[in-house]
Image (cartoon, rainbow, N blue to C red):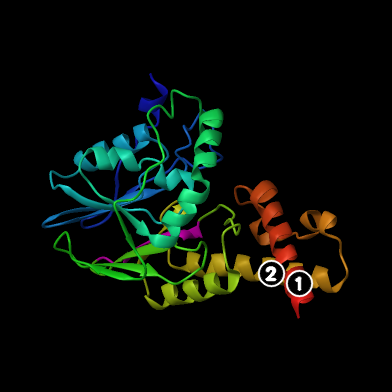
């Protein structure tokens, strides 16, 4: 069996007309073809709204095939929720099928500024065959704030809360089912990456997501989850910042921070030994900078 066939996504029905295309989890490598992030789609009476494009041209094509296995409705649009490789590099698969790719303007700017480097790194990680034909592209449409979409004959809300988990990160809410595709704002069982974030904005965004009272949330990584995941991720961010602030007050050195910011509640999450350690250093440096600028 070819590696690509082994990784072929299969749609999971979450609610009437709402589907998850689950990522495989873990760290991107040749075994999982880097297909670690979730995607999804919403079917309306006039077509399909797709959410995220996958890691590569081949992955994007596989996601489209999985959509077509569920419905004959045409895919009208695909939204990219965040500027991370596993969510955006399948864009050309949609564009070659005549489907426009749309993302927030600041996500497009971040993608343009750094994703050539990301793409080269993915080719090294996953192999040239897995990434064959995958290129950088420019989105067909960009937007600057929240949107109300009725393109598929089913109202969908595109939520944007300013600079939160990333400068242009969005979430997609289907009011009819109560399903929330949270993109980079939530991860389940995996340490959230704060590299592109503003923590205060992220916490505010999570509070606004909770206020929607979703029935089910789809994180960027990990399984579809109960709405309590929103509070769990908020708690991780709060604990991370509180522990780093305490270490700064104690006069700790940056070199020791990664070892000292232990958060037992989250020690079993994926990437605790890598992303969490990096998060600790990033959060500490930001707090130190704030102190110096006072």
Expressed as whole percent of the image width and height from the top left, the position of residue 253 reads 86, 61
- Give the magenta range: 177-187
Taking the image as drawn, is residue 37 in sight?
no
Q: Nearer the viewer, residue 264 or 275?
A: 275
Expressed as whole percent of the image width and height from the top left, the position of residue 275 reads 64, 50
Which residue does the image show at 41% across and 78% down from the upper left?
A: 211
Residue 178 within the segment the image draws in magenta: yes
User: Do the residues under discs 1 and 2 have CB atoms within 8 angstroms?
Assistant: yes
Which residue does the image show at 45% across and 56% down from the upper left?
A: 109
Residue 31 drawn above or below residue 148: above
Which residue does the image show at 56% across and 35% down from the upper left?
A: 121
Q: Nearer the viewer, residue 15 or 198?
A: 198
Expressed as whole percent of the image width and height from the top left, the position of residue 150 reads 18, 65
Give the residue number, with chain letter if any, for mark 1.
245
Which residue does the image show at 69% across and 47% down from the upper left?
A: 273
The local secondary structure at tag 2 comes to: helix
Crowding near the residue tagged with mark 1, few <14, some 14–19, many ≥20 C-alpha atoms within 10 Å:
some
Expressed as whole percent of the image width and height from the top left, the position of residue 219 reads 44, 57
Instruction: Give the label on residue 170, or none.
Output: none
Please identify the dominant SS of the magenta region: strand
Picture quadrant where residue 281 is located:
bottom right
For the N terminus, give its image quadrant. top left
Picture quadrant where residue 56 is located:
top left
Residue 211 drawn above or below residue 113: below
Q: What is the spatial separation of the Cα atoms under label 1 and label 2, in whole angstroms?
A: 6 Å
Q: Nearer the viewer, residue 273 or 189?
A: 273
Give the residue number, with chain letter if any, for mark 2.
241
Left or right, residue 16 beside residue 239: left
Residue 183 within the segment the image draws in magenta: yes
Q: Nearer the viewer, residue 214 or 98?
A: 98
């Amino acid at each position: 069996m070819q590696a690509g066939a082994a990784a072929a996504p299969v749609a999971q029905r979450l609610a009437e007309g709402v589907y998850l295309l689950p990522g495989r989890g873990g760290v991107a490598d040749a075994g999982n073809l880097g297909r670690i992030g979730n995607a999804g789609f919403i079917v309306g009476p006039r077509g399909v709204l797709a959410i995220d494009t996958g890691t590569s041209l081949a992955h994007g094509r596989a996601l489209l095939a999985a959509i077509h296995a569920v419905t004959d409705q045409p895919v009208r649009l695909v939204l990219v929720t965040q500027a991370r490789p596993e969510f955006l590099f399948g864009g050309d698969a949609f564009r070659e099928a005549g489907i426009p790719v749309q993302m927030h303007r600041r996500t497009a700017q971040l993608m343009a500024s750094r994703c050539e480097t990301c793409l080269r790194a993915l080719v090294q990680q996953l192999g040239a065959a897995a990434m064959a034909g995958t290129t950088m592209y420019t989105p067909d449409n960009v937007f600057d704030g929240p949107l109300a979409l009725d393109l598929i004959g089913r109202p969908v809300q595109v939520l944007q809360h300013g600079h939160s988990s990333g400068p242009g990160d969005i979430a997609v809410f289907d009011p009819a089912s109560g399903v929330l595709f949270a993109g980079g704002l939530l991860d389940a069982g995996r340490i959230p990456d704060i590299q592109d974030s503003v923590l205060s904005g992220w916490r505010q965004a999570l509070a606004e997501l909770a206020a929607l009272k979703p029935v089910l949330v789809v994180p960027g990584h990990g399984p579809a989850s109960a709405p309590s995941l929103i509070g769990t991720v908020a708690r991780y961010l709060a604990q991370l910042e509180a522990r780093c602030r305490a270490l700064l007050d104690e006069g700790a050195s940056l070199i020791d921070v990664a070892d000292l910011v232990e958060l037992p509640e989250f020690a079993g999450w994926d990437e605790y030994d890598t992303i969490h350690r990096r998060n600790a250093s990033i959060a500490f440096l930001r707090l130190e900078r704030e102190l110096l600028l006072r």
